[in-house]
Image (cartoon, helix red, strand yellow):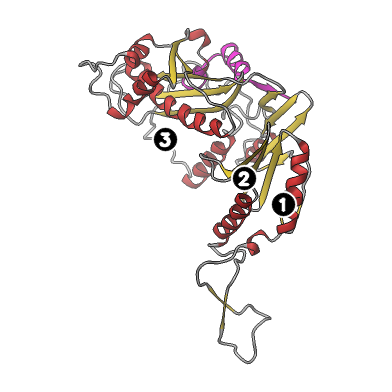
Amino acid sequence: MDVKSAFLNGVLQEEVYMAQPEGFVDPHHPNHVYVLEKALYGLKQAPRVWYETLTKFLLASGFKKDTVDTTLFLKRQGDDLILIQIYVDDIILGSTNPKFCKKFSKIMETKFEMSMMGELNFFLGLQEKQLPEGIFINQAKYINDILKKFNISDSSVMKTPMATGTLLDADPSGKPIDQEVYHSMIGSLLYLTASRSDIIYLKGSPNLGLWYPKDSRFELTVFTDADHAGCKLYRKCTSGSCQFIGDKLVSWTSKKQNCVSTSTAEAEYVAAASCCSQVLWMTTQLRDFGYNYKRVPIYCDSKSAISITANPVQHSKTKHIDVRYHFIKDHVEKGNIEIHFVQTDFQLADLFTKPLDEKRFQFLISKLGMLNMS
């Protein structure tokens, strides 16, 4: 759904003046300026006042603003749900009952000049293929575009994101890189993580994406892991986690921890705490959809880290850990989450923390619910 001249619908609440545009200058008052009543494209207030105007209209129409995402609006009618997602002047809508989509479009037409764009198949670099069996999401076109942009379309194909045994270290005598190109490349890759948990071997798998089968089961499951930099003390660690609804990946993260860990157990504990905060955010989001989750299972392959979360007493070996990471204990006691042990062979978060061989990598990719739909 596309709202035509969307920004012109926004009524300004503050005084804004503009010079008389070329070709429309009043010959009797050439030095006068206009005071704007409504927003214009290019005005910095325009997106905000348009959002406020649309929000008031949706709330008056019976929609509720999502707790987490303020650009998402929801409305329930009996057992059916309609969702409205706003991105500037574009609107995505979906419902468990198709007739509510048609009803909403008619409501919008009474207030705004707009056009229906049909079934969603491409949006903000994301390609959505809707099939009777489910929905497939990938970014093949976006991948091919960034390969051309950075002149690496002819590069060799890799079978895994990183070869096993690779050691990354600073190279003081190396050739300096162009920081502008580097920042642009990193920005492009960050957006790619919306549908890809692997961002290195893109040329060999542009059609890899997330597959959401119809009528799949709906349960929230989490895996968390950390790599303690080869177990060298006082090194920052890489932590990774992935969240699933049913068997399909819905969120993942991999980053260097912003604290120093002195042991593998501590690194795993800090990673689990960071993962817990993501789980709480996700359960808040799902609550607005009518799903209330308690005792969300978090799988960790460190029994020592699990013991720390279950121990109400702070011993000398754990009291130095930043207090902000101990909130995970509180949520274990409240029953919001549960920490379970998982063998390393079935630790899906390994994909985000260490280089793997091709067989192991392909196994984890399949378990994440990703398919190569060429």
Q: Is residue 314 left or right of residue 228?
A: left
The residue lying toward the viewer, choosing from 304 and 166, is 304
Where residue 214 appears, x then y in whole percent?
72, 23
Counting residues from the start of the chain, the first of labels 2 and 1 encountered is 1
- Name the secondary structure under disc 1: strand
The residue lying toward the viewer, choosing from 141 and 105, is 105
With respect to residue 371, does 119 lie above or below? below
The residue lying toward the viewer, choosing from 280 and 275, is 280
Q: Is residue 272 left or right of residue 322?
A: right
Type of the residue with mark 1: Asp
Circle 3 or circle 1, nearest the eye: 1
Q: Is residue 60 left or right of residue 136?
A: left
Type of the residue with mark 3: Gly
Where residue 282 appears, x then y in whole percent?
51, 30
| Label disc, if present, on residue 2 of the rendered structure | 1
Calculate the distance from the C-alpha at mark 3 to the C-alpha at mark 2: 57 Å
